[in-house]
Image (tube, rainbow, N blue to C red):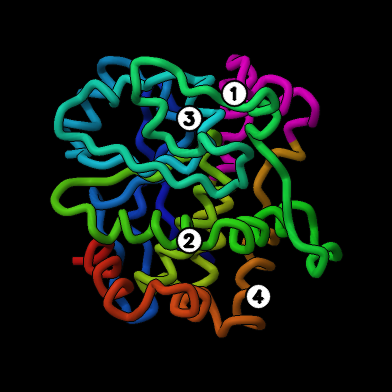
Amino acid sequence: MTSVRSDRWLRLDGTTNTRDLGGLPTSDGGTTAFGRVLRSDNLQTLSDDDVRRLVEDVGLREVVDLRTTAEVLLEGRGPLRAVDGVTHRHFTLLPERGHHTDVFAVEEDDAPDLPADWVETILPRQTTEDDEGEPPAVRAYLGYLHHRPENVVAALRALADGGEGAAVVHCAAGKDRTGVVVMFALAVAGVPDQEIVADYAMTADVIDDLVAKLRDSPTYAEDMTRRDVASHTPRAETMRRLLELLHERHGGPLGWLDGHGFVAADQAALRARLRD
């Protein structure tokens, strides 16, 4: 029986999948702390009241954005970009074409000179031949780890080094790219696998509203309508299988992190951020 708590949800006008990583049990009998790290879907449609609540009530000071540069360019600047004291960091987990693959270009007054086919790379699906026998979602997640391991680690390091205040990590839906980064963060905090799986699966509770929101955006509408809601719904067995593969191949999430440069000191800093 899972002990994931429903009061972890943060109900905002402009998002449908925002929740706190606090309140999760750890293997040593503790719990993760509230108000340190949030996970979310796209923040582009936050209302003025949402921004006020996040900055003043939650104490948000850092945004870790896992979207591609194409997504950021198409969606435009979100309202949190205009807030002094909120730092934005970008670490795409998907391969991008061309040379303009840095979100800082988006912050310039003029759009960068992107290659003609740049829009085709909004949500590329890539994995390795060795994983062709795995379910599509598992293959996609393994693709993040194969193609952009440095950005998985960089996103976690940003969360660890964020300083005072809360951080939010997000992508478009807050379930796939965000789910993988959050999986590693919770593993570092000592949250057992079954609770990580349960946290991942919570997005299914809001999937109808989440898909409806993304369908309203020209950026994501085609991807949302091409498949039915069921195919977008996260399943516990997906995260369970990813964790199984990490244990088989690397000795677990911490072994993968250690092998990719997120060593004991980094893990200790992130653990301290997520726990009292």
Question: Given the image, on which type of amino acid does mark 1 rest?
Answer: Leu
Q: Quadrant of the N terminus?
A: bottom right
Q: Nearer the viewer, mark 3 or mark 2?
A: 2
Instruction: Tell me whether the residue at label 3 lies in contact with that at label 1, contact meaning CB atoms closer than 8 angstroms.
Output: no
Magenta span has 220? yes
Q: Residues within 10 Å of mark 3 (few under 14, many from 20)?
A: many
Question: How many discs mark residues in the rendered view?
Answer: 4
Q: Nearer the viewer, mark 2 or mark 1?
A: 2
Element type at marker 1? helix
Relative to the observer, which residue lies in front, 13 or 129? 129
Residue drawn at x 50%, y 48% is 178
Image location of residue 139, percent across then percent down: 73, 58
* Residue bounds of the magenta highlight: 203-229
Q: Which residue is mark 1?
A: 214
Give the number of the disc on residue 244: 4
Left or right: 105 in relation to 179: left
Element type at marker 3? loop
Q: Is residue 119 visible?
A: yes
Residue drawn at x 20%, y 40% is 61
Relative to the observer, which residue lies in front, 202 or 168? 168
Q: Which residue is mark 2?
A: 150
Left or right: 231 in relation to 113: right
Relative to the observer, which residue lies in front, 228 or 171? 171
Residue drawn at x 48%, y 73% is 260
Q: Is residue 114 above or below residue 58?
A: above
CA gap, disc 4 and disc 3: 29 Å
